[in-house]
Amino acid sequence: MWLSLFRVFMVALLAHAGYFYTPVPGEPLVGAGLGVLAALAVITLEIKLRGVPAHHLVGALVGGVTGLVGARLVWGVMEGLDLVAEHFIHALLIAFLVYMGLVIGTRKGEWFEPARIIAAFKDSTRLHQYKVLDTSVIIDGRIADICETGFLEGTLVVPQFVLRELQQVADSSDSLKRNRGRRGLDILQKVQKMGSVQVQIVETDFPEIREVDLKLIELARRMSGKIVTNDFNLNKVAQLRGVAVLNINELANSLKPVVLPGEVLRVFILKEGKESGQGVAYLDDGTMVVVDQGKRALGRTIEVTVTSVLQTTAGKMIFCRWPEAGPAAEGEARREPRPGERRDERRDWRNGRDYRVGEPRPDPDRRDSGERTMPAGLMTDVTASDPRGADTAPLVTPGSSPVPAPSLPAAVSSGDAPAAKAD
């Protein structure tokens, strides 16, 4: 309300001044109209400059004044020369230097930030120790613990677009996202209350850039600072752009204790692994431990021996063996199966037996490994109907190989088979 009253007062004042001190002799109404137009132009400029950061305005002011001083000094040197269109050259020189001062002062407005000026007088080495915080590292929360221990120096910079993204996450309809956003705001407030680090919220934005990650990279590049994040993709892109990155996950991995092959660990087998017989455990720092044959000790605390360590960008994995699991867990040598032997080590569903590598098993297409037997009477009927004779007719059943027929009684073999069939 007070601002609106001040604007009305300024319009009335300039209209009054234009009426009584009109630039057009004998036309006071024209002067009043010019005063109103001048007041409206000033109000429009004030509205346009409302969203411009203060340090940019200070930079533009300093640049404009510097341009005026420079134009006056240059014109003092050229004043003794006999120049054609002297007034035009003077006006052109002033306009050029003032414009250049305004542009340079606006683009380099961060030089006039209070934090930079204080740091320049306090300690010149702190001028380039800006740490630009990412949204992910604020929500993560570990940045507060790092600042509290004193491992992070300099000024923590929180851009306005990062705060806007945090607020959008905190206002989300999803309860999980809403809790994460509120946690990030609480962490940021906690860091602000610490005396070991200084938190600075900057208004610098890049409207021509839509992605928040690219805005962070551009801001860090202009401020000669470093990006603090735990986002893997942002880490890679920033390194390609030549911007230094402090990755919280890499710091956490470097602080984990070093484990060498042959060391003995005491772990709790929490769940089964992906491979057969494996068990999975975790160290206190969250490192995954894969135990060969550890499935047998599920839900127990055992001592295992480290065999190898796999280090990746996502973290560290430790592979161990359990000496008490038996020869299979200790790497017992296993011979290659000979031709005709089975490789499968799984339980045979036909007889419930466990077969190891190289151990022969029955033919899966037959119910047993012996020859089939039939009653003598039934065998007599089958062989008697075969015109080739009993000695040459093999017994063939579906799904089996030929089985030699047993010897027949003397009455059948002497040619009495038809009579026996007639009876």
Image: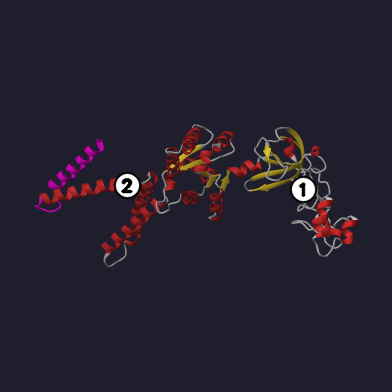
Spatial CA distance of label 2 from label 1 is 78 Å
Within 10 Å of disc 2 (Cα), the crowding (few <14, some 14-19, many 20+) is few
Confirm or deny contact between disc 2 and disc 1 (CB under 8 A): no
Q: Residue at x 84, y 51 (%)?
A: 376
Marking on residue 345: 1
Magenta: main secondary structure? helix
Q: Residue at x 22, y 47 (%)?
A: 40
Q: Is residue 404 magenta?
A: no
**Quadrant the N terminus occupies:** top left
Q: Is 362 or 339 nearer to us in this picture?
A: 362
Secondary-structure class at tag 1: loop
Between label 2 and label 1, give the one nearer the viewer: 1
Q: Residue at x 37, y 51 (%)?
A: 63
Marking on residue 318: none
Q: Residue furthest bottom?
A: 84
Q: Is residue 26 magenta?
A: yes
Looking at the image, what colour scheme do you see? secondary structure
Occupied quadrant, residue 393: bottom right
Q: Which residues are magenta?
A: 1-27
Image location of residue 5, percent across then percent down: 22, 37
Q: Is 278 or 114 nearer to us in this picture?
A: 278
The image shows residue 131, relative to residue 144, as above or below, that is below
Q: Earlier in the sequence, mark 2 or mark 1?
A: 2
Q: Which residue is mark 2?
A: 49
Amino acid type of the residue tagged 1 in the rendering: Glu
Image location of residue 407, percent across then percent down: 89, 56
Q: How many numbered markers are drawn?
A: 2
Secondary-structure class at tag 2: helix
Does residue 39 show up?
Answer: yes
Q: Residue furthest right?
A: 410
Amino acid type of the residue tagged 2 in the rendering: Leu
